[in-house]
């Protein structure tokens, strides 16, 4: 009886807190064919894509509709990320998200604008009181756009578990998305993983191009592969959908050795807290150096992604001499289209291990502290995905730097979480203490990239999330403000709005404030285009008179620029 009650309680809790996918619950959020520019789980910089990108025929302003009954739970507006974004909670336990919108429906837009004026901020993230805005399925909610970090007009659409906020693959729902094209496999990578391991006698990883014939993929020119020791596999591939040439991501990879499944990766659901583990899932070093992505089918010890369905021996295999290993890949998209790859590895003895590189050992599961006269770095356990030998060098300062150049390895080793970095200042004038910051230096061009920072007692400190070469520089140049359609004592060339380009050469635009006749006005910021615009609001600004405009822009170290003009509108 106790077992029965426990089982019943378990299933009730599961039912209440784990929404079940009902494939026909949602209608499409747009009334045009659902052609995808990007799919769920597609590989992006530092993250998996958490939704689908629906093409909007190269235009902005297409109507977006509620795919089911629901209530607005959140409105977020930002110059970056999703730009203007709307979140709707539904009774079935899911939340739908709409990103890169050009504008919200009028009542929502008015509500958000009032809060922007109340907070005197373009950036807002509002938790909307439950029930304030309710929608029926098929009601207009917003208009598609290109806001935030979008690379072109489209609608970013997500389905999340409302309780966990984990994104669920929208392609598991029964939207009318045409796809009868199998994934395309382009290249295989083999990795020696243990001392003495090798691929065809070499201790370095080796790629093999793939070709397709007889309904399957094969190694190009059918080469003989020999190996010894512990090895891993990687795959470069893409998926395409009907009606679009956009390169999408692979849904599922199955890897078998001698008929036994040892690795299965699947993208039904993602977890935002784990999303940066993509940098361990891919061959990050190869991407950094060769600008091409391989998906590693072996798992580093520090990789905590939960998308691995099968992970026997972390996807690694031990190759023994004199044995043959039949390797088989089955690669799927979410609609059941499949691609296969089969090849054989001949086992050989291991080779003499190469000498270990010199440097400082770093263990991924342990805190690492580096304390030198000119640098202090504090990296918590879990900062890296695997053990490695850190290459550390100190190089002399150049004329435009105020510290030694500190080489903390190369930038091709991924960093999972930010760490504390302090560099000792050299010959930094007291007047420039507040303008000092840590910069990362491009090893080829010497270009500086701001890591931020604050001067304290002879050191500049910041949190950074990469390796590479660092130094102290100063930013003494104020941001630039370039008017687009206004001149002092002149009429506007576009009477709907006032527009400016704002830019900063190092520490970046940190804040801005626009006023007309001494009152704050809402300048909308398009970060990717360095553009800010104020659309004249007749409900807040008396028109038909002369006005005083003042725009102030501040960078990351408090350098400030101001533009003032008188205009008639």
Image (cartoon, grey):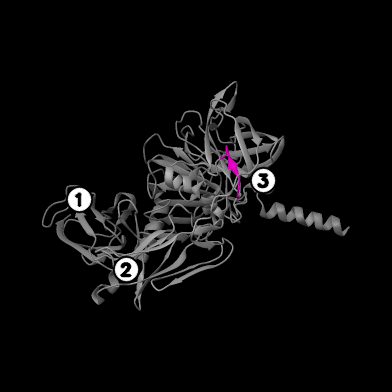
The residue indicated by pointer 2 is 403
Q: Position of residue 90 (x, y in %)?
A: 58, 50
Judged by depth in the image, the label closer to the viewer, 2 or 3, is: 2
Q: CA distance from mark 2 to mark 3?
A: 48 Å
The residue carrying pointer 1 sits among few (fewer than 14), some (14 to 19) or many (20 or more) residues within 10 Å by Cα, namely some
Q: Which mark is residue 240?
A: none
Marks 2/3 in contact by CB < 8 Å: the verdict is no
Residue 80 % position (x, y): 39, 53
Mark 3 surroundings: few (<14), some (14-19) or many (≥20) residues within 10 A: some
* Residue in the foreground of this view, choosing between 174 and 420: 420
Per the image, label 1 sits on a secondary structure element best described as loop
Left or right of 400 in this view: 146:
right
Please identify the quadrant where the N terminus is shown. bottom right
Looking at the picture, how far across and down is residue 491, in whole percent?
13, 51
Taking the image as drawn, is residue 304 in sight? Answer: yes
Q: Is residue 122 above or below residue 64?
A: below
Mark 3 highlights which residue? 309
Q: Of circles 1 and 2, which is in front?
A: 2
State the residue position of label 1.
Answer: 484
């Amino acid at each position: 009886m106790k077992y029965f009650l426990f089982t019943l309680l378990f299933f009730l809790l599961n039912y209440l807190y784990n929404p079940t996918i009902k494939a026909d619950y949602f209608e499409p959020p747009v009334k045009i064919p659902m052609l995808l520019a990007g799919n769920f789980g597609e590989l992006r910089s530092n993250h998996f894509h958490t939704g689908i990108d629906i093409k909007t025929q190269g235009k902005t302003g297409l109507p977006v509709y509620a795919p089911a009954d629901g209530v607005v739970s959140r409105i977020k507006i930002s110059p970056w990320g999703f730009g203007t974004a709307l979140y709707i909670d539904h009774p079935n336990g899911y939340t739908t998200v709409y990103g890169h919108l050009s504008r919200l429906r009028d009542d929502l837009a008015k509500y958000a604008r009032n809060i922007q004026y109340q907070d005197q901020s373009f950036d807002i993230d509002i938790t909307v009181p439950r029930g304030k805005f309710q929608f029926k399925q098929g009601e207009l909610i917003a208009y598609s756009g290109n806001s935030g970090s979008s690379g072109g007009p489209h609608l970013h659409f997500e389905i999340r578990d409302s309780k966990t906020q984990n994104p669920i693959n929208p392609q598991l729902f029964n939207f009318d998305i045409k796809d009868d094209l199998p994934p395309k496999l382009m290249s295989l990578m083999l990795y020696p993983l243990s001392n003495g391991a090798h691929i065809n006698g070499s201790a370095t990883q080796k790629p093999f191009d793939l070709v397709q014939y007889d309904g399957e993929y094969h190694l190009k020119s059918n080469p003989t592969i020999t190996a010894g020791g512990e090895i891993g596999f990687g795959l470069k591939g893409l998926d395409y959908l009907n009606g679009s040439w956009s390169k999408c991501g692979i849904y599922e990879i199955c890897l078998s050795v001698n008929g036994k499944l040892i690795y299965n990766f699947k993208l039904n659901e993602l977890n935002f807290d784990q999303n940066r583990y993509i940098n361990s899932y891919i061959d990050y070093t190869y991407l950094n150096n060769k600008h091409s992505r391989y998906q590693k089918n072996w798992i580093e010890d520090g990789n905590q992604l939960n998308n691995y369905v099968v992970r026997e021996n972390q996807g690694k295999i031990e190759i023994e001499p004199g044995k043959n290993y039949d390797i088989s890949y089955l690669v799927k998209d979410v609609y059941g289209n499949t691609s296969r790859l089969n090849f054989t590895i001949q086992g050989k003895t291991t080779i003499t291990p190469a000498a270990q590189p010199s440097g400082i050992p770093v263990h991924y599961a342990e805190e690492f502290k580096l304390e030198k006269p000119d640098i202090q770095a504090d990296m918590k356990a879990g900062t890296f995905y695997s053990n490695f030998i850190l290459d550390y060098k100190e190089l002399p300062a150049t004329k435009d730097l105020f510290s030694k150049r500190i080489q903390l390895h190369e930038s091709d080793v991924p960093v999972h979480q930010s760490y504390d970095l302090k560099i000792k200042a050299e010959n930094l004038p007291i007047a420039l203490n507040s303008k000092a910051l840590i910069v990362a230096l491009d090893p080829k061009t010497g270009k500086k990239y701001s890591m931020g920072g604050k001067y304290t007692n002879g050191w500049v400190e910041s949190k950074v999330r990469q390796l590479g070469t660092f130094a102290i520089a100063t930013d003494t140049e104020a941001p630039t403000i370039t008017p687009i359609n206004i001149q002092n004592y002149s009429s506007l060339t576009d009477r709907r709005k006032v527009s400016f380009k704002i830019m900063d050469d190092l520490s970046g635009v940190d804040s801005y404030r626009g006023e007309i006749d001494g009152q704050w006005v809402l300048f909308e910021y398009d970060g990717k285009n360095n553009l800010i615009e104020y659309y004249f609001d007749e409900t807040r600004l008396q028109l038909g008179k002369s006005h005083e405009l003042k725009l102030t822009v501040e960078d990351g170290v408090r350098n400030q620029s101001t533009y003032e003009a008188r205009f008639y509108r």
